[in-house]
Image (cartoon, grey):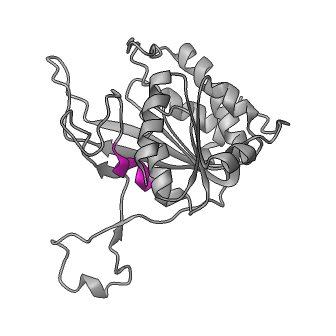
Amino acid sequence: MKKQFNNSTNVEDSTSARLTQNPCYVQCGDNLELLKSQPNESVNMIYCDILYGTGRNFGDYQDLKPIRSEIENHYLPRLIEMKRVLKQNGTIYIHTGVNTSHWIRCLMDDVFGYNNFRNEIIWYYNSAPRKKNCFGNRHDVIFRYSVSGDFVFNPIREPYSLSAPRGYEKERYYHSEGKVIGDVWQINILGQNDKTERTKYPTQKPKELIRRFVLASTNEGDTVADYYLGSGTTAVVCKELNRNFIGCDINPKAIEITNARLDAVS
């Protein structure tokens, strides 16, 4: 039997007050507690780079083990709350890895509805760990779901290929800003020697990746949330693009790095 989730909760509206004081609000703590404190339909977009289910101890935090019950017990209540706080025209992006993507997809179908699935985005990057007995993993998976059939989507475009046939500019789908990008994105990961963005946070994502999500699913003045804040890239991109932001991470070091990066944005 298909699971049904109640999407209504009465909570005190503290989000507006937080954003009035600081349009880029971040806090250290349990993301489920923060979610439960937020009012219904108060966020335009959510992006979360969740735990990858490696079972590894990163020193500052312990990753989940790739066990179905552990994954479901952690993420199901959080996904339910994320749906509640999203506006009816809102979008959620869940960034995951090969160990958990199949279970996360099933949970998101249950919570958001399979009919609200929009994309499985493949982030393809330029390096992979060397392994003796299997192919190196060179991609992450990002699931994009909407709350309803009425959602914000601003196409992201790229230049046409130089190999496009002559006369293509006269075709009915030609656009002066280029073609709409597909669902496989080749963006390099940040190297250890990168001096433009790189922090000491181990799972930092490049700004170009997050910028695409924010531009595609929000407009200026909208509110974006990231409940697995990490190095704070989502917060930095939102500040640069004039979006409000709410973020949370259980790791104090993540909050420290995020605040330092936000302070550096003019």
Q: Residue 41's x, y, as percent?
A: 74, 48
The answer to which of 8 and 101 lies nearer the viewer is: 8
> As drawn, is 232 to the left or to the right of 84?
left
The answer to which of 178 and 45 lies nearer the viewer is: 45
- The part of the image, by quadrant, that contains residue 66 is top left
Q: Residue 2's x, y, as percent?
A: 70, 32
- Residue at (25% x, 30% y) in the render: 137
How many numbered marks appear? 0
- Residue at (51% x, 27% y) in the render: 103
The answer to which of 6 and 249 lies nearer the viewer is: 249
Looking at the image, can residue 23 be seen? yes
Where is the N terminus found, in terms of image quarters?
top right
Q: Residue 122's x, y, as percent?
A: 35, 44
Q: Is residue 97 magenta?
A: no
> As drawn, is 210 to the left or to the right of 8?
left
Looking at the image, can residue 4 be seen? no
> As drawn, is 146 to the left or to the right of 99?
right
Q: Is residue 211 magenta?
A: yes
Q: Residue 150's x, y, as percent?
A: 66, 61
> Residue reaching furthest right?
10
- The part of the image, by quadrant, that contains residue 217 is bottom right
What span is colored magenta in the figure? Answer: 206-212
- Residue at (61% x, 49% y) in the render: 23
Where is the C terminus found, in terms of image quarters?
bottom left
Task: Classify 200 as above or below 225.
Answer: above
Q: Main SS type for the magenta part?
A: helix
- Residue at (73% x, 40% y) in the render: 84
- The part of the image, by quadrant, that contains residue 53 is top left
